[in-house]
Image (tube, helix red, strand yellow):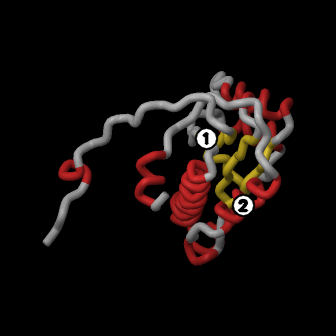
Amino acid sequence: MNILDIIKGRRSIRAYLKKGIPKNVIEELKECLIWAPSAGNLQARKFYFIFNQEIKNKLVDAALGQTFISEAPLVIVACADLTIERHYGKRGSELYALQDVAASIQNLVLYCYERGLGTVWIGAFNENQASKILNLPSDLRPVSIIPIGYPAESPEPPGRVRKDVAVEEIL
């Protein structure tokens, strides 16, 4: 597959087969996360790989009852490292760290699709509750929950806004 086919083919998956993810693939997922671009190469992000069923169940509660989270063999909680503020001020903690995490997640979801794995990028959750569940230090902000597993569904592509509406060319 070429990258444009991967971008167009990826879907949000909310149903997973009861099948584990090979260890070598898990290691490659880590590579995808750490090789994303970051502001000033400070890499203001941290990722928690959760295999523990009890913690996944608690994350379902934090994520407003999105039960499919607990069905995935792997759940990643992506966090922004707010210590970037020491280098870039408020813009670092309020924007750059979030961009760093988003770039990593985009790498991750595209790679997962290419490897036959399904993902969904979840932003609807209680950050304070997720922080308590994972016992996060105060300088880490959870910004996304990403369940990962082999898809048990194949959703149709959602509609997209027309290019001429989304993109303005300035000549």
Secondary element under disc 1, as helix, strand or loop, is: strand
Which residue in the protein does label 2 denote? 28
Which image quarter is the C terminus in? bottom left
- Residue ID at (57%, 77%): 40
Quarter occupied by residue 111: bottom right
Q: Quadrant of residue 149?
A: top right
Give me the residue at 71% from left, 27% from top.
60
Q: Residue furthest bottom?
A: 40
Q: Nearer the viewer, residue 92 or 70?
A: 70
Q: Is residue 74 left or right of residue 80?
A: right
User: What residue is rendered at 64% in x and 42% in y?
Assistant: 146
Per the image, the residue denoted by label 1 is: 118
Nearer-N-terminus badge (2/1):
2
What element does badge 2 sit on? helix
> Tag 2: residue type?
Glu
Whether pointer 2 and pointer 1 mark residues with C-beta atoms closer than 8 Å, the reply is: no
**Amino acid at dot 1:** Gly
